[in-house]
Amino acid sequence: MLLVSQAPIERPPCAEPIVIGLVNNMPDAALRATERQFHDLLSAASQNRVVRIRHFSLPELVRAPVAQSHISRHYEDLGELWTSRLDGLIVTGTEPRAAALEDEPYWSTLTRLVDWAAERSISTVWSCLAAHAAVLHRDNIERRRLPRKLSGVFVSIKARRDEMVADAPFQWSLPHSRYNGLIEQDLVSRGYRILYQSPATGADVFVKDEASLNIFIQGHPEYEADTLLREHRRDVGRFLAGGISEYPEVPSGYFSDDAIAALSAFRQQTLRHRDIGLLRAFPTAALERGLSSPWRLPAVRLYENWMSYLADHKTSAREHLDRSSQ
């Protein structure tokens, strides 16, 4: 049973909740969808545990009024985190703006979050760009710019046994949506353990166990079946509006043959007459048919294992923090 609450919750005796902080840095258009995706995933993975989710976001991110209003009403100030005790933390990425992560306006706050999580959480999941930032700050591992956007669903192979992937399948299909990546050799040479990897995407899931267990995911197992579709439509809109110069490539391994044919026809139409008004004719309904999320069950298993780890280490982590604060 998952209980999502910002306030104290009633619970049965001895059913102490697992408290998870979600630092949601996704762009405005994906802000609420990301909340829903992680809430649904944690709910499915909770195994009847009581879970409390606290919401935060990096304050340096510029938000439109509607998104900022939502954050003001439903999110805590990040300053509240520094004196808090959480069991687990999930940190999402955001859309990159600068060529170098150190030049992003939120860099100093994000690195403080990396350091805080290392001392104050049992375990943290770093998603996509947040994973890139964390390994850069902790181990000076630079991400590499990809030749083109990596978008689609790619088969990932289990690389080793580990409690985080116990009972998880040997391979699964994982969504990706990013412009940068990490080199596996760089990670391994600095003590990271690769749990899933793919020739197409590199290290998909990898971990480093220090005072706190860090889990890094370059893909997006939290995505819903239509998330890549919505992202592709957004990128097409940017092309039609003149924000990008090249028509975006179709996400790989995601659409059916009929859907790809519909997308090809729409692309030809836009290349003949490039106008943002054409976005109204984007064949969303036709593309939605047949979409599925084959990554869902493995994703639930991964987060089940993570929450079991949080529950198992909760008491010892509290004792450690009590001793360190004396």
Image (spheres, rainbow, N blue to C red):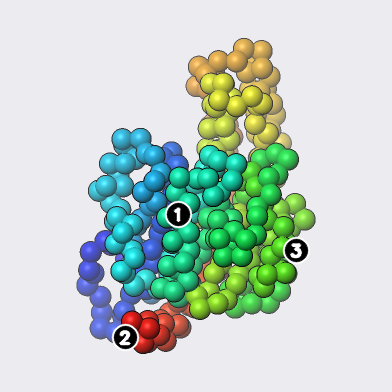
The x, y position of residue 236, in whole percent, is: 58, 28
Instruction: Tell me which label, 3 or 1, sits earlier in the chain.
Output: 1
Query: In the figure, is residue 84 to the left or right of 107?
Result: left
Label 3 sits on residue: 185
For mark 1, give the secondary structure: helix
Would residue 115 be found to the left or right of residue 172 on screen? left
Sequence-wise, which precedes: disc 2 or disc 1? 1
**Residue 108 - label:** 1
Point out residue 133 in the picture as x, y percentages from the top left corner.
Answer: 55, 56
Categorize mark 2 by other alpha carbons within 10 Å: few (<14), some (14-19), many (20+).
few
Q: Which quadrant of the figure has residue 171? A: bottom right
Q: Nearer the viewer, mark 2 or mark 3?
A: 2
- Residue 129: image location, x then y, percent: 56, 52
Alpha carbon separation for disc pair 3 and 1: 27 Å
Q: Quadrant of residue 159?
A: bottom right
Residue bearing mark 2: 326
Q: CA distance from mark 2 to mark 3?
A: 40 Å
Name the outermost residue toward the top: 273
**Marks 2/1: CA–CA distance:** 28 Å
Toward the right, the furthest residue is 199
Circle 2: element type: loop
Q: Which mark is residue 189?
A: none
- In the rendered image, the quadrant that contains the N terminus is bottom left
Is residue 306 visible in this depiction of the protein? yes
Position of 213 relative to 312 (above/below)? above
| Tally of marks | 3
